[in-house]
Image: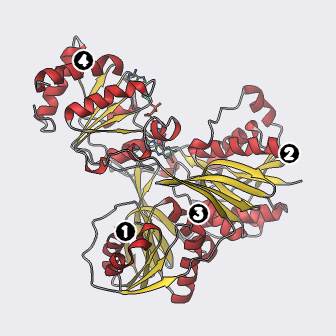
Amino acid sequence: MKVLGVAYEPRDAGELLRAASSLNAEFHILAAGRAAENAEEVSKYASKAYILKTKSPYSIFKAVESLVKQEGYKLVIGEGYRNLRDALSRVAGSLNMPMATDAYSLEVSGESVVVVRGFLSERARMKVEVPLPAIVLFTQRFTEPAEPLGHGSIVELKPEEGPERVVEVKPKAVGEVNLEEAEIIVGVGRGFRSKEDLKLAFELAELLGGQVGCTRPIAADLKWLSEDRWIGISGKRVSPKLYIAVGISGSPQHMSGVQNARIIVAVNKDKSAPIFKQADYGVVADLYQFLPVLIRKLREKLGR
Amino acid sequence: MDVIAVLVKASLNPDVIRVEPDGSIDVKSIPLKISDIDRNAVEEAVRLKQKLGWKLIAVSVATWGPISARMKDLKLAVQEALAKGVDEAIVVADDSITPGDQLTTAHAIKTALEREGVRPKLILAGEATIDEVSSQVPGRLAALLGYNYISFARRLEVEGGKVIAERDLEDYVEVVEAPLPAVVSVTQEINDPRPPTLLQIRRAARKPVKTVTSSELGGLEKPRRRILEVRGIQVKRKQVILEGDSLEEIAEKLIEALVKEGVLRL
Ligand SMILES: Cc1cc2nc3c(=O)[nH]c(=O)nc-3n(C[C@H](O)[C@H](O)[C@H](O)COP(=O)(O)OP(=O)(O)OC[C@H]3O[C@@H](n4cnc5c(N)ncnc54)[C@H](O)[C@@H]3O)c2cc1C
């Protein structure tokens, strides 16, 4: 069987190889996005690497479509970046292939593939079976990268231009955080009334040697914090030792991003907020009253 | 008259799931509701309809059966769209395509539009639904219809036969233009949907809703996905509520607990 992995970030190549290696298959990679800028690196993880220097979902769609048609790939795998969801959903439509997204694991049995995937906004897992040929998109960073194989051949493909025209590209503002590495994270939600008030959370985080993360509305709607602090199903997945959720209701979309935290503390003034069912320690209080007290107590004990 | 179509899904409501003692979930026990981001799509479609003077229809395909038990929820989801300003609705409901998959849904939408003889200039959808969260249907539909596709739009305009949209990607935003006809998926940030007023809801009762079956559409693609199992994610947290006579006392207790857990060093 032939499997095509579509890499968008350089690190995807090794992760997709790990997923493919249990399938006893011939594994090739199509590298687009930032992965295409690292052809040498990516080609270490497959016997053949196609390089497609573009982020355009139309161009990725057309390239995968023609590779599946010409080379007979039975399974196309990738990770769930927005541009890949776009490109591969079009391949699925055009070639009438089943597609499963948000996958955590995959097995091939005979002529079908069995996938365990996120379901019900990450409140459940669904195990499904679809016939091959099929497309499977994993959640980002679903596994550790495999060891490199050596050097595969490199084939550069020319991106096919689409009917759409990109008028402007604006990089997003990034803060100086790397939440994935943080041991302690103070998460802020809409319980804060203004951007200025977030300084309470920053003060607490600094005292603990941690970072500040947030819910989607804080970054995406209110734009109080940069989007690299956004935690959840459509943001970052983090795994700190300690997550302190302040003024956060506990929606499944947010909580799926912190399920690997060892200890979760919730501060919320509503005692029936769902977050308390998903926390180890809960404090029912107004954050504006509680945080200053907590900060003062910590300062006393830490002597700072 | 030019037409905008908006896709509306009656989704499983993830806020009211019941996990059985053995960890399994029976999807038949979960009620349906309009998918949250479809509300954003409807709001945007109504805004564009008013601006452009086009007709606005909603298309909804039932994914979760049995239809007889689901009809009320299916109708409610569509009623909300009608109340907000959609002119009429088509609902595809047939037990032969439930539980559905995205391949079936996209195919059913295309077939229903063709049977009705409508070729929308613009089709709007939410970036994902709250049950499947897969973002597949709009892309599949665009490919099936041969339309242009703009995904994850957080701003949208239609001008001079083109859509101009701001696509919201992980680490950048891009402004793109594409000629109509097009399918556009919108993000939650595109607008702030208001619930319909009582008057709007009452008026919507008179708007036409056409419910069609697979055979009335000349047959539909059957789902290829087989659901083997659905399991709830067990949250194994301690759920200790810290109490005390004062906030000082609670703060002390919290610090003590965190030190004991080994996640805080003093
Ligand atoms: C497809 C999809 C994807 C999504 N992806 C994400 C995601 O990746 N990340 C994410 O975070 N969200 C995501 N969301 C949004 C999510 O559903 C919630 O809307 C969001 O997480 C809520 O954020 P919040 O907890 O900050 O706000 P709210 O739900 O409004 O909660 C605010 C909380 O603050 C409390 N509060 C208010 N005032 C005070 C006070 N003075 N002191 C203490 N507590 C107070 C309130 O009791 C309330 O519980 C997604 C939604 C969808 C549909």
Circle 4 packing at 10 Å, graded few (<14), some (14-19), many (20+), is some
**Which quarter of the rendered image does ligand 1 occupy?**
top left
**Which residue is labeled 1 in the image?**
A12
Name the amino acid, label 2.
Gly
Residue B156 is situated, as x and y percent measured from the top left of the image, at 68, 49
Picture residue at 55% right of the left edge, 58% below the top = B135
Residue that appears at 15% across and 30% down = B257
Location of residue A139 (image quadrant):
bottom left
What residue is pinned by disc 3?
A: B102
Amino acid, disc 3: Gln
Q: Is residue B91 left or right of residue A237?
A: right
Residue A62: give its label: none
For the residues beneath circles 1 and 4, the answer to whether they share a chain is: yes
Q: Name the amino acid, label 1.
A: Asp
Marks 4 and 3 share the same chain? no
Element class at badge 3:
helix
Between the residue at mark 4 and the residue at mark 2, the CA separation in whole angstroms equals 57 Å
Residue designated by label 2: B53
Question: Where residue A293 is drawn, which disc sits there?
Answer: 4
**Residue A162, position in %: x, y?**
65, 71
Q: Report if the CB atoms under discs 3 and 2 are less than 8 Å apart.
A: no
Chain on which label 2 sits: B
Q: Residue at x 85, y 62 (%)?
A: B117
Q: CA distance from mark 3 to mark 2?
A: 31 Å
Q: Residue under mark 1: which chain is it in?
A: A
Dot 4 and dot 2 within a common chain? no
